[in-house]
Structure formats: structure tokens, C-alpha cells
Amino acid sequence: MTFLGVFAEKGLLHAGNQTTVWLWFFWHSGYPVFIFAYTLTEKFFRLHQFTHKQANRFMLAAIISTIGVGKFSFSIAEKKCR
């Protein structure tokens, strides 16, 4: 969808010359960052018991953070290429 001239003249997402490369970078760097965050969580919260309400808040924050990081990554990829 970001390749220039395949679906539209500037790509379907108004891509620049290197948007595809940046999206690939963010996509492949996400997994190691997730593993690192999981490791830190295990280290600091191993013995802590969360209440149901705290767990729900944590999950909501994780979902909102994931969406925010995705939007931020795409905006960086789009701006770097113009």
C-alpha cells in the first residue's frame, strides 16, 4: 500500500520514497521492544498481586499505548519521507 505507483501515484497512504522502509523498521523493532518490556515487568512485578480493577486499568493503558505508538510510528515514517 505504500509502494509508489502500484495502487496510486503517491501510494494509498500518501507515501514518500522511504515510507515502506520506515514502516518495515518499526514493524520489526516492535517485537524486541515488547520482549524487553516484558522482561522488565517480570523483574519488577513478579511478587506483586494486582486486583481485578488494577489489571483492567493496566490492560486499557496497554491497548491505548499500543494504538498511540502505532500512530506515532506511522506519522514519523510519513514525515521522514517527504
Image: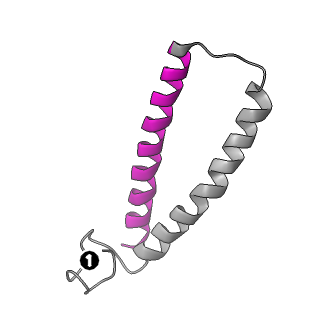
Residue 43 in picture, x, y percent from top left: 79, 33
Q: Is residue 45 left or right of residue 65?
A: right
Asked whether 78 or 49 is in front, the reply is: 49
- Judge whether residue 55 is colored magenta: yes
Residue 77 in percent (x, y) is at 43, 65
Residue at the image position 27 percent from the left and 68 percent from the top: 13
* Residue 24 drawn above or below residue 59: below
User: Could you tell whether 37 is left or right of 75 in the image?
Assistant: right
Q: From the image, tell me which residue sits under label 1.
A: 11
Above or below, 53 relative to 2 = above
Q: How far from the left and from the top, in percent, is residue 49?
A: 69, 16
Foreground: 68 or 62? 62
At horizontal 26% and vertical 77% (from top left) the residue drawn is 11
Which secondary structure dominates the residues rendered in magenta? helix
Q: Residue at x 41, y 73 (%)?
A: 19
**Helix, strand or loop for disc 1:** loop
- Tell me, yes or no, whether the highlighted magenta stretch contains residue 9: no
Side of 56 relative to 29 (left or right): left
Q: Look at label 1 and name its amino acid.
A: Gly
Task: Name the image colouring.
Answer: one colour
> Magenta segment, which residues?
53-82
Q: Nearer the viewer, residue 76 or 53?
A: 53
Q: Quarter of the image containing the C terminus?
A: bottom left
Q: Picture coordinates of residue 59 (x, y %)?
A: 50, 29
